[in-house]
Amino acid sequence: MTRRFSPLPAAMAVWLLLACLLVSPARAAVDVSESPGELNLGPHMQLLEDAGRELGIDDLLGRDVPLPWRPSGEETINFSFSDSAWWLQVELANTGEGPVRRLLELAMPLHDYLDAWVVDEAGEVVVAWQTGNRRAFDTRPVAHRTFVLPIPLPPGETRRVILRLDTHDGLFDATPLYLLSDGSFLYKAQRELMAFSLYFGALLALMIFNLLLYLVIRERSLLHYVVYLGTFFVLMFAARGFAFQYWWPSWPTFNNQMLPLTIGLFAVTLAGFSSSYLNLPRYAPRFSRLLHGVAGLCLASALPALLGHYALVFRIMIPAAILLSSLMLGVAVWRSWLGDRLAQIFLVAWSVLLVGVSLYFLRVAGVLPYNFFTEYAVQAGSGLEFLLLAFGLAYKINLLKNEKLAAERATHDLERSHSLRLEAEVAQRTRELEAANRRLAAMARTDPLTGLLNRRQFQELVDEELQRRRRSGRALLFAVMDIDAFKLYNDTLGHQAGDEVLIRVSDLLQQHFRRAGDRLFRLGGEEFGLLLEVDKLDQGRHALEAFRQALEDLAIPHVQAEGGVVTASFGLVCCNDYQRVPDADRLYREADEAMYEAKERNRNRVVTHAILEETP
């Protein structure tokens, strides 16, 4: 007789199997050998909430009972306000035949605590890190403004990467996670650094320009604008992780306090500039006081950061910032409705920035998702806002000038002369600045005594020429020239006479070497460098011999020299083996050795060295 199974235990087994599948989803390893140079790991991540912050890495690796991991499914990891610790994991597989290294980037610099482990197939920890924004900067395995973890992957093996994110007091920031090759990371880092350099450079240039303009015309709105720009610069520099990396890498607590405090100061300077720009103390004094009061609330809400309450700061500051933004937009609309052209410019300019700031805060609060627009809305909005407000300030200055002229009709001629004098002074200062810039540019490139190119230009131009000749396959000729017994000449006749000799030698060099590709350098003291346009050793030797003879024919008296006149020794190098001579320093050493050989052979001669590739 066949025994039948009870349907109840069978059904329970099926449900238990489904439950295990739900709480422990299968992890599909990411094949790094086939992945592109840059991969968004957000959708591949698995998440585990540790509400009691009780789990450790040993609990995850040694637990027999499956943990309730769940797939992320999101492009960006965002826990917003949460009192839990969060674990993330992903498996990376290298199916190739050689070892691979990938860089895991958490592209948000404001995480408080980040612990990471790389686990091999046997469940052993291969490498571990403990870093974060509340730990010293040197805890990061890669010195970068964001968190970058190097993951080694041997051929044919899988590595499990486990991350633990925790906060000081419950505020997480949205974080995209990227898996990058070394080349992709370098390209991404350089691209971001270039963009931020241009952005911060533009802010700094605008701040300096407005400060100088304030010092000239003493318009208070310009000073308020400069203070605002300075606060905004520090805020953005800190929010993007650059301040922690470059300004105070050993002060993580101070770094975390600075960000909310700078936001509060930004609100105060924003209110001060807006009130001054729109002349609110004159047109709406009560509204001006209200605006400053709300800005003061923003600053006061940042003070708990000094006691370590970071999440509380943003819970209060975000509504206060939205209220401040609304008030500013309201007064701008009111003044624009009354026909105030300055208010109309202000409305357009500040609307762009305040929308960007609001989007950023809403993204921090978790109301809006992380994407390129919400992450960089502040930068995009502020860039356009700065241009519009610069135009508005110029317009306001022009209005003030016209009002002053209209109010002082009786002294019109005096005011006009004053204005013309002011304009002349500005123009004169501009011309002086341009002339000074030209002189500085020339000084940076040339030797002030001889007018020849200096040592810095030697490095840059010769390196460029080496690269050019390497690509074309042409040989490069370079010579080092040293005036013979020049120290004795200086000791005998004095340094002024020595300087005159250097000038005469430099003039003679410029008369002899006039090809478009010839470059003449003063390398230091009585030593000169000659980069020749020719590419054959005989041509170079002939040109140097002609110059050597011309220098001797000048017959500059030198009683301490063997021939009784000023002469020079030359070391000429002809090179087309750019493996042996990769840069300007190596080329200089080769030519210098040849020159010293000329010195040892009784001076006043040309010694050549050829550094040529061996023909098979």
Image (tube, rainbow, N blue to C red):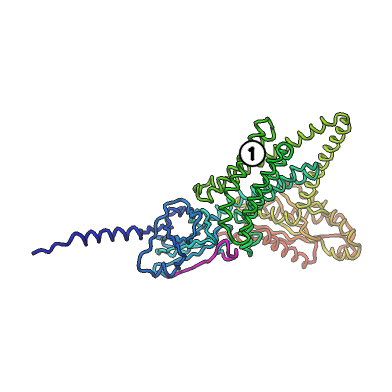
Position in image of residue 358 (x %, y %): 57, 45
327 lies above or below 486: above
- Number of numbered discs present? 1
Residue 524 lies left or right of residue 242; in this view the side is right
Residue 275 seen in the figure = yes
For the N terminus, the quadrant is bottom left
Residue 130 inside the magenta-drawn segment:
yes
Q: Nearer the viewer, residue 295 or 502?
A: 295
Q: Position of residue 150 (x, y in %)?
A: 51, 62
Based on the displayed image, in which of its 4 quarters is residue 290 positioned? top right
Image point 84% across, 37% down: which residue?
A: 424
Q: Quadrant of residue 57?
A: bottom left
* Mark 1: amino acid: Ala
User: Regarding mark 1 in the picture, which secondary structure is present there?
Assistant: helix
* 90 vs 2, nearest the viewer: 2
Q: Is 530 one of the magenta-colored residues?
A: no
Report the residue at 72% width, 63% height from top: 594
Residue 612 showing in the rendered view: no
Query: Badge 1, how many Cα within 10 Å: few under 14, some, many 20+?
Result: many
**Label 1: which residue?**
349
Q: Nearer the viewer, residue 365 or 387?
A: 365
Q: Position of residue 156 (x, y in %)?
A: 39, 63
Determine whether, in the image, residue 11 is placed left or right of residue 309. left
Considering every residue shown, the one lying at the far front of the view is: 286
Q: Where is residue 120 shown, x and y percent of the image?
A: 42, 67
Magenta segment range? 124-139
Q: Residue at x 17, y 61 (%)?
A: 6
Residue 402 vs 67, above or below: the answer is: above
Which part of the image, by quadrant, shows the C terminus?
bottom right
Q: Nearer the viewer, residue 338 or 20?
A: 338
